[in-house]
Image (cartoon, rainbow, N blue to C red):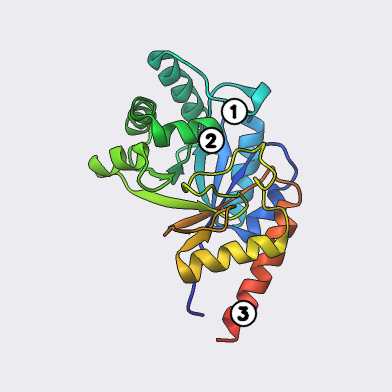
Amino acid sequence: MKNTLNINADVGEGMGNDAFLMPLIQACNIACGGHTGTALEIQKTIALAQKHKVKIGAHPAYPDPVNFGRKSLKMHQKTLYQTLEQQLCLMLTQLAGEQLHHVKPHGALYHDCITNETIAGTLLEVVELLCPDSLLITASNGALAQLAQKKGIEVWNEAFIDRGYQDNGQLLPRTAPHALLDNPEAIYERIKNLVYAKGVYSDGGNWIPLEAKTLCVHGDTPNAASNLKSALDRFWENEMKK
């Protein structure tokens, strides 16, 4: 087959999807105590990832379980550093010496690392201290990607296969009507566009060029695993016809 896929998923969030998602993905981002995630949940998720030979990453967030890490917090730089350090240490402890493949911030922290160089720099400092050989997953051309590349840290540019895009290339707010792509057909079309045409259609119908190393699906989206499986079955069926 001509094409290969690199799909990552946010997991370890207690949604019950992980066992069904792991056989479908190549990398996972495990919640490590910010928005959710306990030591036991991390251990269970690591074991699943190892069983399916999925690359293991940390998914740190603002320390805000009430809002599931999806609300920006105004934090002193030192306080943010400390909470990110605690989260990555928790993750690394559960790995018991195994290499952490990557770090991908979650939710509001993810978006703030794109637009705010200070916040991106704080996360990068923690990564350099605790897991300097790990790569970063983030949006291309954002602050985190630019800072990491200047330091020689590998970055996987990411696109989302289950989220709507605005005309400016940013994700639709989750409160918007078409923020989530929650059916196999829409997810298949998104994968097809990203793989073959290197871009996505915005919610307004405009074409946005977007070349991604990895494609993200959210494990907390309803029917995430079944939707992804159906979309991938169709994608690979079409690939076999070539």
Q: Is residue 151 above or below residue 233?
A: above
From mark 1 to mark 2, how far is it between C-alphas? Answer: 7 Å
Question: Residue 188, percent across and down?
Answer: 64, 65
Taking the image as shown, residue 151 lies to the left or right of residue 39, namely left
What amino acid is labelled 3 in the image?
Asn
Do the residues bearing badges 1 and 2 touch, measured as CB atoms within 8 Å?
Answer: yes
Badge 2 is on which residue? 106
- Residue 92: tell me if it is visible: no
Sooner in the amino-acid sequence: mark 1 or mark 2: 1
Q: In this view, does 40 lie above or below 15?
A: above
Badge 3 is on which residue? 238
Do the residues bearing badges 1 and 3 touch, measured as CB atoms within 8 Å?
Answer: no
Which numbered disc covers residue 91?
A: none
Badge 1 is on which residue? 69
**Secondary-structure class at tag 3:** helix
Taking the image as shown, residue 110 lies to the left or right of residue 127, namely right
